[in-house]
Amino acid sequence: MTNYLKTLENHLILAKAGTPALTIFFKGESGLGKTQLIKDFAKNQGLKLTILNLSAIDASDFTGLPKIVDGMTTNSRPSWFDTDILFLDEINRVQSSDIEAALLSLLVDRKINGNELNKNCLIVSAGNPDSDDRYNTKSFELALKERLLDIEFTRTYKEFLDYLKSIKESTNLLKFYELHAKDLASYTFRRLERALDYVTITGDVESLAYYLSPNAYNLYVEFLNKNLFSFKDLIEGQISSKLETIAEKKVLLDLSENLLSYNFNGTSALHVNKFLLTIRAENKQAFFESLKFLALRKPEKFGVFKTESKKLKMFDGLKDFLDIYLA
C-alpha cells in the first residue's frame, strides 16, 4: 500500500501547484479496498472528498442540470466541482454516452459544459480489470486512455490484515482471520471487513453464517471453543510442551499484542524466551514480522521495549533473527 499512497501524495502536490498530470487509474478486482484507500487518504490529508460512481450516476448529476440563461440553454455548475479530491469510481463501466463525453472533457480540460473544476482538485479514478468477463467493463478510447495513469491495484492477505490491525481494535474474530487465512481465501477483503465490523459492534456471532458462510461460522465456533493458551499462560510458565500450529500462532498473537504494554520481569522474560526457542520456523518469522510492524507503528514505545528486553535477555538465542528483522 505504501507505493499507492506515495503516488497519491505526489499527484496531490502537483494538483495543489495547479500542474497538469495524468489521472491515476487504480485497476483491480472488486473488494480489494480501492475506495477505502482514497477515503483514508482524504481523511489523513484533511481534504474534502467526493465519490462519484460513474456506472450508476445520472448524467445530469455529472454534467450539471440544464437551464436557460438569456434565451440560451446551458448547464449549471455541479456542486461537486468545489471538492478537493474527486474519486471517479467504476470509470470503465460508464453506460451513458453523455457521461463519456463529459468525462473526456473533464480529464482533458478540467471542464464540463464550460464549467471549470476547482483548479487544485486531485482527480483519482478506479475500475475493474477489462480482461475479466465477470465485470461489464468497456475499453477506453485512445484520447481518454492517454490521460490515464494505469496502476494495477493488488493487495495480499497479509497487507489486508496489517491494514485491519492498524484501524480496528483487537478481537477474537480478527485473530481468527489471521490464523485461518487459507480457509478465508475465497472471500473478498470488503466482505471480511464488513463481517468484522458487524460482529464487533453487535456481538452477533451467528450472523457470520450469512456474512460469510455456515462453514466459516463453524470454523470460528471451533476456534473459540478450543483450549488455546493465552498470554497469561505464557508469562506464568504454563506452556511446557510444543504446541499445535494453531495454538502456537494464538500465543504469538497474544504476545505481540502485549509486548509494548506489559511490564516484563526476569521470570516472565525467561518464559517468553523458552517458548520462542521451541516455535516453528514459519511462526517465528511471522512473529518477528509483527515486531517489525510494531516498531514502525510505535517507534518510541518499541525503542523502550527493545532496550528492556536486552537487559532481561528475553531474546537470547534469537538475537540473529531479531537483528535481521529490526536492522
Image: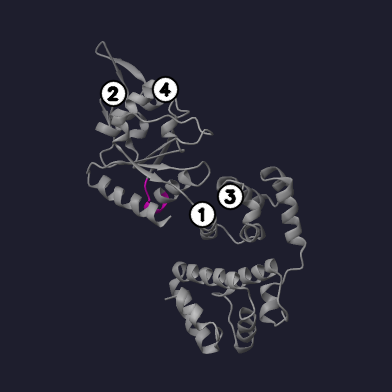
Foreground tag (1 vs 3): 1
> For the residue carrying disc 4, how many other residues have a C-alpha within 10 Å: few (<14), some (14-19), or many (20+)?
some
Residue hosting label 4: 96
Q: Work out how far the residue at label 1 is from the one at label 2, CA to CA, in angstroms.
A: 42 Å
Residue hosting label 2: 113
Q: Which residues are magenta?
A: 43-47
Report the amino acid beneath label 2: Asn
Residue hosting label 1: 156
> For the residue carrying disc 1, how many other residues have a C-alpha within 10 Å: few (<14), some (14-19), or many (20+)?
few
Residue 289: image location, x then y, percent = 51, 69
Asked whether the beta carbons under mark 1 and mark 2 sit within 8 Å of each other, the answer is no
Q: Work out how far the residue at label 4 is from the one at label 3, CA to CA, in angstroms.
A: 32 Å
Q: Secondary structure at mark 4?
A: loop
Q: Work out how far the residue at label 4 is from the one at label 2, CA to CA, in angstroms.
A: 16 Å
The image quarter containing residue 82 is: top left
Say which residue appears at 31% left-offset and 32% top-offset: 144
Asked whether the beta carbons under mark 1 and mark 3 sit within 8 Å of each other, the answer is no
- In this orientation, does residue 176 appear? yes
Report the amino acid beneath label 1: Thr
Foreground tag (4 vs 1): 1
Main secondary structure of the magenta stretch:
helix
